[in-house]
């Protein structure tokens, strides 16, 4: 299992546009990807409703995880989206 | 019936008969099951959700702008894989497609509603998708508001759309020709109804108790700024309210095209932006270009400096919005109060406003400036916009020369400086010998001239942009620039005050850059006054002894402001 831990920097947190971009990007990858808030329960990163339900705010730390070929690449992309201001 | 009061979320006055949207969404009965073919039922549910998603996307594509983004996000919810799994499991357990959709949405709905705030406001979006999907499964698509007035009885003219709540899909396709105002019983300032009403320019009142019991056809006078709804108002009141609003709107709307005084002296009107996201508002308010593109958004909160390519794309996104227009980019403006995570931590500064910030910080870390300038040069080469670069926090001619040399090195011909420090204004002619143009940052110039910290609320009076000392320094900057034939613009809150904008033009300022929403009023104010009137207003303001006297003296010379309600 590969993972990335990043701090969310967007003013709106992982909601609205950042959440949509994050989920759309995750959905394109042929891997199972999860996201968790802090040490909370991981949820499907391809589900906008699950991601919104995490209620990730600016300054929260999220852990994004995936396994398999190309995991590093997609996790880097997702980490970048999640941490973009 | 007495007047109703809610929260005004989109300004303006609208009058028309109430069109009441009172569709009751279908609720599938608990325990409703399917005929036994779970696979076919699952396919039916999947198709209904896909249809709803496609319909939302199509409505978004037609409406464009902010509505498209909101509706695409809703479509993403309709296609949610977690939701699909929930629906399939319920159908496998025997539930009908409609009931399964209802219950599967319920789980997420409870989570969002429990969170309140922004997430709580998304419950309405979720309910709308659910109701649309169930209606599709029932074969009864939900009725929306009529998109043309022809479909309704009664007098011609737009109607006031009244509902318990409105879905983005309902409001996105409407225009001010059809709808005079929105009134909803529920919703709040961050609801999508509020956002779309502002985007459409339709007055709106939300969170208005009693709205849902308004009878269809009742004439309503809606004030979207005050948040009031008056049923069956006297004709005279309607005429007065509409007349006042129309006068102001017409005056603002009549002033279109490039900024200029009444006698045709051009004053380019530009927008201040903080990133590509602000471009849309700038264009919507008629900005002729960008007078201040703050680039901090690329750098702050980052553990590594942004690469040349990433910066290039971000700059290009803005440049491409203004083909043929001017875009003035300010080099990174960081300091001890806005530290950069990828640099060694700054030494503690007791007074960051007077510390190693702006150009001073860039000189200490030239590699950051070099990368930024190279990225800007590459973006400029790929664009049809006129890209200019300026340095923040310049105190001396030597600093201006250093910055101009760095820009030349990177292949950028036009290098300007911000005039924020009194020394730069006092010795403006020396700086103008080195820099291609000036842009006066009135907020910082006031802070440094009056020695009044911008962060200290008690000193707001000293921060007043009408301080005669500040006007004097703007005059010095303009004169120094003119000596070398250089343009001198103003970016800062002062430029967005319609009366002060006229004064600045009178002083000799050559362009004005401001927050986008301020552009129409400034454009209208300039169009109402000749350059001569601006010069007289400026002379009167500069001769005054205090900000209040300066304001009054200027206004006495600017008779057109009163006509505009400014």
Image (spheres, rainbow, N blue to C red):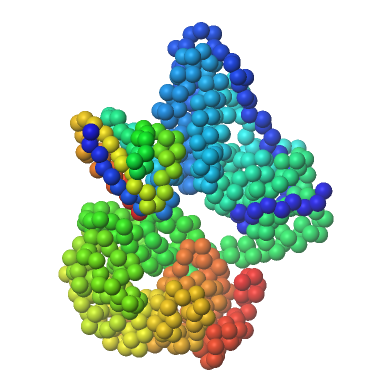
Residue B11 as seen in the image, left or right of residue B488: right
Residue B71 as seen in the image, left or right of residue B230: left
Quarter occupied by residue B298: bottom left
- Extreme residue toward the front, this view: A39
Q: At 53% from the left edge and 34% from the top edge, which residue is drawn?
A: B110
Residue B495 as seen in the image, left or right of residue B382: right
Q: Does residue B63 appear in this view?
A: no
Residue B301 image offset from top left, x and y in percent: 31, 57
Q: At 41% from the left edge and 54% from the top edge, which residue is drawn?
A: A11
Q: At 34% from the left edge and 77% from the top edge, which residue is drawn?
A: B351
Position of B288 relative to B142 (above/below): below
Position of B333 relative to B480 (above/below): above
> Quarter of the image containing the N terminus of chain A?
top left
Residue B17 image offset from top left, x and y in percent: 74, 45
Q: At 28% from the left edge and 56% from the top edge, which residue is drawn?
A: B302
Q: Does residue B252 appear in this view?
A: yes
For this rendering, which residue is in front, B16 or B426?
A: B426
Residue B385 image offset from top left, x and y in percent: 33, 61
> Quarter of the image containing the C terminus of chain A?
bottom left
Number of residue marks = 0
Position of B142 relative to B182 (above/below): above
For this rendering, which residue is in front, B74 or B261?
A: B74
Residue B268 image offset from top left, x and y in percent: 43, 70
């Amino acid at each position: 299992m590969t993972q990335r831990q990043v701090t969310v920097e967007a003013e709106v947190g992982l909601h609205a546009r950042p959440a949509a971009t994050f989920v759309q990007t995750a959905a394109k990858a042929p891997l199972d990807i999860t996201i968790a808030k802090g040490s909370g329960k991981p949820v499907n990163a391809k589900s906008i409703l699950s991601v919104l339900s995490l209620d990730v705010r600016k300054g929260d730390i999220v852990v994004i995880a995936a396994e398999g070929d190309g995991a590093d690449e997609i996790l880097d992309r997702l980490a970048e989206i999640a941490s973009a201001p | 019936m007495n007047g109703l009061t809610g929260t005004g979320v989109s300004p303006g006055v609208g009058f028309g008969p109430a069109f009441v949207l009172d569709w009751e969404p279908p609720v599938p009965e608990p325990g409703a099951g399917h005929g036994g073919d779970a696979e076919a039922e699952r396919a039916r549910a999947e198709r209904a959700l896909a249809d709803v998603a496609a319909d939302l996307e199509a409505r978004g594509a037609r409406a464009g702008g902010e509505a498209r983004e909101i509706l695409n996000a809703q479509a993403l919810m309709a296609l949610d894989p977690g939701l699909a799994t929930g629906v399939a499991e319920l159908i496998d357990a025997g539930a009908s497609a409609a009931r399964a959709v209802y219950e599967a949405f319920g789980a997420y709905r409870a989570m969002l509603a429990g969170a309140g705030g922004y997430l709580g406001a998304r419950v309405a979006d979720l309910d709308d998708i659910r109701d649309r999907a169930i209606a599709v499964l029932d074969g009864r698509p939900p009725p929306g508001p009529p998109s043309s007035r022809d479909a309704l009885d009664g007098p011609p003219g737009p109607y006031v759309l009244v509902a318990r709540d409105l879905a983005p899909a309902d409001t996105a396709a409407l225009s001010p020709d059809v709808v005079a105002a929105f009134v909803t019983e529920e919703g709040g300032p961050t609801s999508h109804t509020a956002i779309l009403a502002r985007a459409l320019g339709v007055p709106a009142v939300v969170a208005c108790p009693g709205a849902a019991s308004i009878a269809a056809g009742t004439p309503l006078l809606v004030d979207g700024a005050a948040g009031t709804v008056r049923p069956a108002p006297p004709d005279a009141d309607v005429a007065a309210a509409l007349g006042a609003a129309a006068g102001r709107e017409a005056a603002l709307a009549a002033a279109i095209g490039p900024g200029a005084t009444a006698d045709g002296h051009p004053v380019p009107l530009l927008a201040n932006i903080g990133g590509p996201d602000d471009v849309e508002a700038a264009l919507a308010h008629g900005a002729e270009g960008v007078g201040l593109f703050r680039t901090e958004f690329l750098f702050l909160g980052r553990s590594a400096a942004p690469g040349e390519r990433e910066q290039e794309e971000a700059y290009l996104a803005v440049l491409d919005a203004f083909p043929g227009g001017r875009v003035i980019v300010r080099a990174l403006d960081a300091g001890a109060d806005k530290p950069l995570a990828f640099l060694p931590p700054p030494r503690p500064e007791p007074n960051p406003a007077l510390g190693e910030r702006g150009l001073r910080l860039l000189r200490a870390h030239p590699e950051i400036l070099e990368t930024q300038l190279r990225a800007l040069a590459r973006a400029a080469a790929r664009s049809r916009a006129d890209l200019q670069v300026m340095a923040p926090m310049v105190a001396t001619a030597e600093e201006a020369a250093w910055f101009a040399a760095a820009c030349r090195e990177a292949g950028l011909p036009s290098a300007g400086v911000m005039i924020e420090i009194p020394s730069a204004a006092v010795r403006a002619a020396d700086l103008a010998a080195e820099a291609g143009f000036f842009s006066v940052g009135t907020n910082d110039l006031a802070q440094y001239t009056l020695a009044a910290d911008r962060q200290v609320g008690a000193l707001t009076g000293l921060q007043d942009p009408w301080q005669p000392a500040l006007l004097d320094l703007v005059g010095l900057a303009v004169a120094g620039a003119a000596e070398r034939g250089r343009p001198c613009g103003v970016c800062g809150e002062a430029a967005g005050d319609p009366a002060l904008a006229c004064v600045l033009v009178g002083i000799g300022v050559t362009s004005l850059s401001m927050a986008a929403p301020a552009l129409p009023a400034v454009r209208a104010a300039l169009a109402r006054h000749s350059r001569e009137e601006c010069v007289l207003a400026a002379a009167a303001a500069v001769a005054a002894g205090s900000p209040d006297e300066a304001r009054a003296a200027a206004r006495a010379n600017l008779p057109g402001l009163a006509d505009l309600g400014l």
